[in-house]
Amino acid sequence: MRTAVTGLVNVLESYRGRDRVMRILCYSCQLFGGVMTQKNGEKKNWEKSLLIVASQLSHCRTVLRLFDDLAMLAYSMKYGLGKKEEDCIVRWISVIGNIADQLYYPCEHMAWAADAGVIRMKSDKWWTASTALWGLSLFLGILRSFRILLKLRRHREKHHKKNLPKTRGEIKSQIRSEVLSIISCTSDLVNAIHWMPPGFLWGGCSPTWLVGLLGTVSSLIGIYQTAVGGSSGGV
């Protein structure tokens, strides 16, 4: 018990760890609040409270992302044109994804500033732009994982013939990581399209419980991948 508490404290002391905890709490509140509302047919006080908590946590994460631009820029500059990447398709998918991620932040900042009254303009177009960039980044992430999976499967077949158990184990681990990334990105992409303007695919049509469920699944995968040393990102 003491070890678990210490571990949680360590997670909450880091920005990324705190963000992941807020993310899963946000979507979990949406999930349970949405399920109970769907079941009862109306929002009771505590169900409203869950959705309010979800909304406030989402707003808190938006404000904290005001400081993420430089970290993203540093990552993009470090990756550059991905010259160290062996596969050119993976490289250019990653480069375009980094550009989409970099542009996402200023668009979201403008939307936040408009809603907060810092600048006088409508926020709708900026929210749409930021959501579209997030969706593009997720879609590219899915394509990247599928491409890596294809290459890993080819490597696995080769190593299977050569009977190299250690390498096979590493490849299996990588395959599992990419499959989880696809599930995570797909879950977030479904939500991203839901937050697009009505009329664009299923924009505005997903029930609250489904948004919460998909976000919770994505968040749990992100936490798991962080624990095992992988990577999964999500808004």
Image: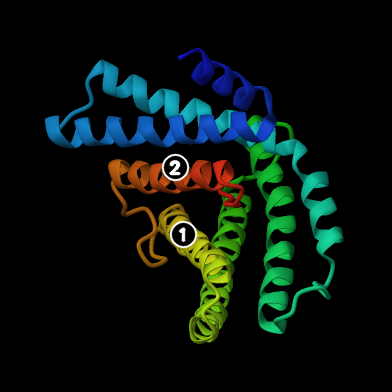
Q: Residues within 10 Å of mark 2 (few under 14, many from 20)?
A: some
The amino acid on which the numbered mark 1 sits, given as a three-letter code, is Leu
Pick the residue in front: 119 or 89.
89
Residue in the picture at 41% in, 58% down: 190
The amino acid on which the numbered mark 2 sits, given as a three-letter code, is Leu
From the viewer's perspective, is 120 left or right of 1? right
Name the disc covering residue 220, or none. 2
SS assignment at label 1: helix
- Residue 136 found in image quarter: bottom right
Residue in the picture at 66% in, 74% down: 93
Residue 235 visible in the shown view: no
Quarter that holds the N terminus? top left
Q: CA distance from mark 1 to mark 2?
A: 16 Å
Q: Residues within 10 Å of mark 1 (few under 14, many from 20)?
A: many
The vertical placement of 83 against 197, above or below, is below
Residue in the picture at 29% in, 30% down: 33
Residue 202: x and y in percent read: 35, 62
Residue in the picture at 50% in, 87% down: 161
Residue 220 visible in the shown view: yes
Residue with the mark numbered 1: 189
From the viewer's perspective, is 4 left or right of 216? right
Residue 12: x and y in percent read: 61, 23
SS assignment at label 2: helix
From the viewer's perspective, is 198 left or right of 36? right
Pick the residue in front: 89 or 112.
89
Among numbered discs 1 and 2, the one appearing first in the sequence: 1
The vertical placement of 148 against 133, above or below, is below
Name the disc covering residue 15, or none. none
- Residue 164 found in image quarter: bottom right
